[in-house]
Amino acid sequence: MIKEINRDEKSLSKKSKFATKADKQIITDLADTLQHHSDTTVGMAANMISEFKNIIIVQMGMIAVIMVNPVIKQKSDPYQTKEGCLSLAGERPTMRFKNITVEYLDQHFEKQQNTFSEFTAQIIQHEIDHCHGIII
Ligand SMILES: CSCC[C@H](NC=O)C(=O)O
């Protein structure tokens, strides 16, 4: 189901909690909501639809990849950039890493570990920050 976007910075600053298989509906709702905003948005975290669980979705070309309980295991090559967010107005400066290795559960709750770079890595870092209550 398409959900309303949470634009309240105070609630977006709350840390999300460990997700379980009981949270599968959040995955569906996050995917539906990202698709609805696909003209402006390349990734979302569950707290952007007011679900405070560690679930993110990241657009990678035609595919939207779900990551449950994502953790960055390795990172390299920091750089300074600017980002916007569907939940916020305008752009803000931030520091990102060009290459990251992420451990997560996929949409079937299978454990995965993958390395990402460039823009995909940037989106993942932005969304994992949301899980930690960090908004750009
Ligand atoms: C480059 S990172 C930007 C990601 C952002 N999604 C919001 O959480 C968006 O505007 O799509």
Image (spheres, grey):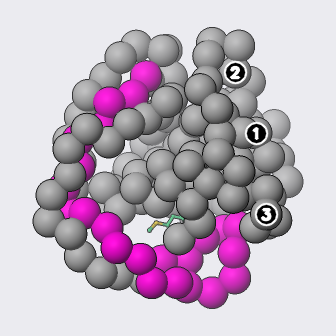
Q: Residue at x 65, y 45 (%)?
A: 15
Of discs 3 and 1, which sits in the foreground?
A: 3
**Label 3 packing within 10 angstroms: few (<14), some (14-19), many (20+):** few
Which callout, 2 or 3, points at the residue further toward the start of the chain?
Answer: 3
Q: Is residue 78 left or right of residue 124?
A: left
State the separation of the CA atoms marked 2 and 1. Answer: 9 Å
Amino acid type, residue under disc 3 in the picture: Lys
Point 53% across, 43% down: residue? 57
Q: Does the stretch in magenta take in 91?
A: yes
Region in magenta: 83-105
Which label sits on residue 51? Answer: 1
- Name the mark on residue 23: 2
- Disc 2 to disc 3, how far (Cα)? 23 Å
Q: Earlier in the sequence, mark 3 or mark 1?
A: 3
Residue 94: x, y in percent? Answer: 41, 77
Cα separation, mark 3 vs mark 1, equals 14 Å
Residue at x 70%, y 21% (from the top left corner): 23
- On screen, residue 10 above or below 108: below
Which circle, 2 or 3, is nearer the viewer? 3
Residue position marked by numbered label 3 in the rendering: 10
* For the residues bearing labels 2 and 1, Cβ distance under 8 angstroms: yes
Which amino acid does the dot numbered 1 rest on? Glu
| Residue 79 visible within the image | yes
